[in-house]
Image (tube, rainbow, N blue to C red):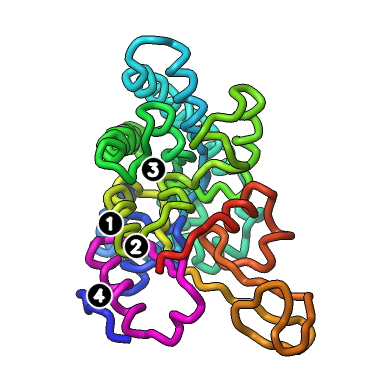
Amino acid sequence: MKLKAKEISDPYILFSTMGCRTCQFTDINFDVVYKQNIYKVLNGEHIDRYNIGLISSNQKDSRGNICPVTIILPTLAMEAKELGGDVVDNFLMILDKAIHDAKDQLIERFEWICSQSPNSAKFMYENGLMAGYVPEEGIRSALKHGTLALGQIGLAETLQILIGCDHTTEKGMELAKIIEGLFKQRCDEFKHEYMLNFGTYYSPVENTCHTAMKKFKDKYGVIENVSDKEYFTNSMHVPVWKEMNPFEKIDIESQLTGYSSAGCITYIELDSTVKNNIEALEAIVNYAMDKDVPYFAINVPNDMCVECGYTDEINDECPMCGCKDIRRLRRVTGYLTGDYKTAFNKGKQQEVEMRVRHG
């Protein structure tokens, strides 16, 4: 596969191994440590080997989210409707307060984590898995380079409540950008006020997608295009049942991924036969790169018969031996998992089953 080349000085800085490590921002605490190290070198002092792991303000290796909080956007949208008047203005006011409340929660959790002994995760600190660790300064020396993730769920449903359409429309995308802009603006402000790396997080909500929907239904009942299913849509993703080709999905979600600085993923669903069409895969990946998607994935069904080992996309039973014991490998959220029917709740199971192929 011939992917478009970009200037790569260090792959550990430019590329991440997980969506939650797509740190699209400058570490606000890197400059302080960097200047301290220069001062030590000029004065002939020793630089601790753990601190050397911190090599760039934009590095993704040896960093990640320290703690996340997820805001249930559709619930806020319903509260905004109940107030009367301009529902969008109401929503933005309520959301702003929720963002500030989430910030306070993140700081409290961060301080508690920093109060713990390094022995609680000794392997991580002593082996440089968390960059920037200085033993005499405690684990805060490493954790301050990670992210305090301010997450969200259900943008598509929120837009339906507020204006009757989602962000696959021009009107919906316009409001989506205002909402995501508020998240980004507040995270930037918090970052400089508290000297901690606050960032917008497009939460994977493996369990929350269902538990939040269940509570929503208990209070508001079934609402068309909002709560007429068992889950809320992941973060700012396009609803999984929307028919479109891979390029259209990338076009929509890439307009919002830039607002996230604490992790996101854009993925497409393809038929298993795509593995025989390398040129198509190459075109899709290059398109996502051109759109500056920070973390991109292609989901392809991968099933295996437990009895005979036959591997391909399998329906109810193995076409070779008739066995119905099939192990199904799927990307349910940001990572690959085993049989989603046993590993996830019924909300996430339904989401997987409702996904359309972007062929």
**Mark 3 and mark 1: Cα distance apart in space:** 20 Å
The part of the image, by quadrant, that contains residue 319 is bottom right
**Which residue position is annotated with label 1?**
251
Residue 220, x across and y down, in percent: 59, 23
Distance from Cα at disc 4 to Cα at disc 1: 28 Å
Closer to the N terminus: mark 3 or mark 1? 3
The residue singled out by tag 2 in the image is 59
Q: Main secondary structure of the magenta part?
A: helix
Q: Amino acid at mark 2?
A: Gln
Answer above or below: position of 45 versus 222.
below
Separation of residues labelled 2 and 4 (CA atoms): 11 Å
Kind of residue at badge 3: Thr
Q: Check disc 4 and report the residue beneath it.
A: 9
What residue is disc 3 on? Answer: 200
Residue 13 falls in image quadrant: bottom left
Residue 37 on the magenta span: no
- Taking the view exactly as shown, the residue that stands out farthest to the top is 84
Q: Which residues are magenta?
A: 269-298
Looking at marks 4 and 1 on the same chain, the residue that comes earlier in the sequence is marked by 4
Report helix, strand or loop for mark 3: strand
Q: CA distance from mark 3 to mark 4?
A: 27 Å
Asked whether the residues under the numbered discs 4 and 1 touch, taking CB atoms below 8 Å apart as contact, a structural biologist would say: no
Which comes before the other along the chain, label 2 or label 1? 2
Residue 176 screen position, x and y as percent: 32, 37
